[in-house]
Amino acid sequence: MKGNRGRAMLVLLAVLGLGLTAVGAAFWFRSGAATADNSLPTAEAREGEFLVIVPCRGELMAGRSVQVVAPLNVPNLQIVWMATPGAAVDRGEAMLRFDTSGAERQLKEKEAALSQTLAQLAEAEAQARISIEQNLLELSTLRTAAERARLETTKAETLGVLQAEEKKIEYGLALDKVKVQEAQTGLVRAQSNSRIESLKSVAAKHQAEVDVTRRRIAQMEVRAPSSGVVNYQMNYSQGWMNAKPFKVGDNVWPGSAVAEIPDLSSLRIKASVEEIERGRIRAGQEVRIHLDPFPEKPFPGKLDSISALTEQNFEWPPSRNFRAYGSFDSIDPRLRPAMNGRLDIIVDRIEKAISVPARAVFARDGKPVVLVAGPKGLKPAFVEVLARNPDEVAVRGIPAGTRVALVELDAKGAGARKGAL
């Protein structure tokens, strides 16, 4: 009897132990589940106007800009100073300077050659005047002698026949000397004029070279053709793969585009629109522009235009998209070309809509559902989706202020990030 009573006592103790273990496990599971429920991230459903948008990525571009090109016919262009990229410049303000040391050295050489030629020209002109004056004086003397010989021939009636003939011969010789001197004077004049004209031609050539060199030096300081911000172009001298914006020390081809000054008042965003979204948008719709450098401030504007055909992009994998152009209602002075951002095209407005984060909507039995947080944990609530944006969803079926979970629970009650609708 005692042995049976002991065995019964042992069985009773085992049963009590198993019961206590089950109660503890259940308590632990419930407390763990509650902790898990309380630790899940939630968000509050809010009521207000819901903007249905078509989002698309893009970048800012200027509708109008002025190119800044390197001077033409100026060799050996090397940048020695440049305005800071993105800096504001006024019309006529210096923005680029090229190395002028070689041109200034050439200018000194050409000015020295010009001075030497001008000195030779002045000497030739003075020598020509002296030679011509000497020949004219000699010619005048011979003409006077010829005139005297002619007067002697008029005395033939009072002279003998032989003397009269001698006077005629002397007169003829005097006339010949006059002709020879006239020819000599003309030759000297022609030679002097030829040398002078030759030296004038050389001087004009040197003067033209000096003027060209001076113009080149003046062109080596490039001034802004208009007011705006400086945007330097890419330098492809090292190949397309190594292209970088122009910088100090780079050599520039004459006449090549070095920079551009965009008109900031013409800034607009150029974005890619998926083909499936094309039918929902049209020119004139309101837009909100969100730029990556200023995420806290949306810029209102209008949708200016949409490309008639799709355009091929150069990304991988390649795709074709429409191009949408959005303008700003007002230009912020901080905006610059090539800033990346998002263009949200407003296609509809829902007044007094209940909106929740897109992460809070899940699928249960093929229907949209949200997990509503309450005192006893989370419970599913089926909702109707009215509109959907990338970050938020307009729903019907829950009141404003409802706390909804942002992650879905798995079968064990733990938070598991499932794919939201």
Image (cartoon, helix red, strand yellow):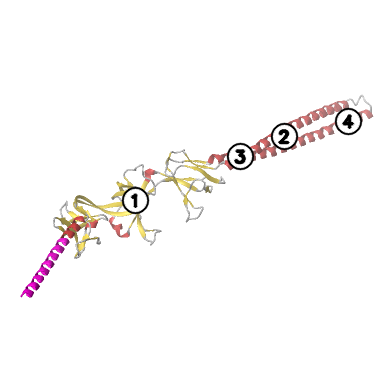
**Left or right: 318 in relation to 347:** right
- Please state which of residues 9 and 78 is positioned toward the viewer in this rendering: 9
Dot 3: element: helix
Mark 1–mark 4 distance (CA, rounded to whole Å): 110 Å
Q: Amino acid at mark 3?
A: Leu
Dot 4: element: helix
Depth check, mark 1 against mark 4: the one in front is 1
- Do the numbered discs 1 and 4 sit on residues whose CB atoms are within 8 Å? no
Mark 2–mark 3 distance (CA, rounded to whole Å): 25 Å
Dot 1: element: strand
Rendered view: 40 above or below 336: below
Depth check, mark 4 against mark 2: the one in front is 2
Task: Inspect this view and state whether residue 383 appears.
Answer: no
Q: Where in the figure is residue 25, as x and y percent of width and height?
A: 16, 64
Q: Amino acid at mark 4?
A: Glu
- Chief secondary structure of the magenta portion: helix
Please name the residue that numbered disc 3 is placed on.
107
Which numbered disc, 1 or 4, marks the residue that appears first in the sequence?
Answer: 4
Rendered view: 53 above or below 4: above
Please name the residue that numbered disc 1 is placed on.
341
- Do the numbered discs 2 and 1 sit on residues whose CB atoms are within 8 Å? no
Depth check, mark 3 against mark 4: the one in front is 3
Please name the residue that numbered disc 4 is placed on.
170
Which numbered disc, 2 or 1, marks the residue that appears first in the sequence?
Answer: 2
Q: Which mark is residue 124?
A: 2
- Do the numbered discs 3 and 4 sit on residues whose CB atoms are within 8 Å? no
- Do the numbered discs 1 and 3 sit on residues whose CB atoms are within 8 Å? no
Q: Where in the figure is residue 344, as x and y percent of width and height?
A: 29, 52
Q: Where in the figure is residue 281, as x and y percent of width and height?
A: 29, 54
Dot 2: element: helix
